[in-house]
Image: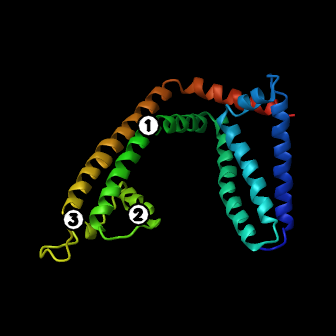
Amino acid sequence: TEEAVTIAEWCVFSYVVTMGFDMFCKVLILEPRGLRQKLRLWLGRGWNVVRTMAVLLYGVGFSLRASPERQQREVGRVLLVLDSVLWFLQLLEIFMVSADLGLYMTMIMKMVVKAAGILLILLVVLTAFGGSWQALRFQEEDWHWKLLRNVFYKPYFMLYGEVYAGEIDECGDKGENCVTGVWLAPAVMFLFLLVANILLINLLIAVFNDVFQAMNAQSQELWRFGRYFQVMDYEASP
């Protein structure tokens, strides 16, 4: 990361400041009188939350990026990289105007809400399996923070079909280098794959299919409402 802020970075900074000022003006012209009510109404729309987070995170990242200390500049660069994801996501808001893409965007947001409960159940199952699988295979391992990563790392990729076949039974047919109860690890793995990959993943797909069918039946109405709010948002711009 260069020590001096470049001209291109100052141009981006000016654009973000302008957008932040525009957002502040939009909040002030909202109907509620109190500032808290205005902010609550503004943040009640999902795209406004993304836009606000993008501006605030950029402000923090740029402040650290302009610091003379190297470590703070590197932290600021990381924050700006993460902030760029939010700015790219805002491009999806433009798709709401399209009759086809707008419907897909509405479906995706609805599916994310519907999937939250199932993903929470899946997280509990994944944590239970990852903790027991790690404890059975490495019984003499001392505590370190990487254990938290190991609990979720391999079980997560097992959801996508990577079962780590070479690590299922490390004792082998001769039973060498085995620890007490290690034979339970394949059994726990079998139960995890049965519940997670077969039951919960297929349940998630069924929920997505139900959302698609329900929203496809009223696609024109959803697209018109989405386009209306998009046009009114630009109309309200100062």
Sequence-earlier tag: 3 or 2: 2
Q: Is residue 1 visible?
A: no
Q: Amino acid at mark 1?
A: Gly
Sequence-earlier tag: 3 or 1: 1
Q: Residues within 10 Å of mark 3 (few under 14, many from 20)?
A: some
Q: Amino acid at mark 2?
A: Asn
Identify which residue, 51 or 212, lies in the foreground.
51
Q: Quadrant of the N terminus?
A: bottom right
Judge depth for marks 3 and 1 and give the one in front: 3
- SS of the residue at dot 1? helix
- SS of the residue at dot 3? loop
Measured in 3D between alpha carbons, the distance from the residue under mark 3 to the one under mark 2, in whole angstroms, is 17 Å
Q: Is residue 147 visible?
A: yes
- Identify the mark at residue 150; answer none if there is no mark: 2
Image spot of residue 225 (x, y percent): 64, 25
Sequence-earlier tag: 2 or 1: 1
* Left or right for 99, reference 42: left
Q: Residue at x 19, y 63 (%)?
A: 181
Residue bearing mark 3: 182
- Identify the mark at residue 225; answer none if there is no mark: none
Q: Residue 49's quadrant in the figure?
A: top right
Q: Amino acid at mark 3?
A: Val
Residue bearing mark 1: 117
Q: Quadrant of the C terminus?
A: top right
Image spot of residue 32 (x, y percent): 79, 22
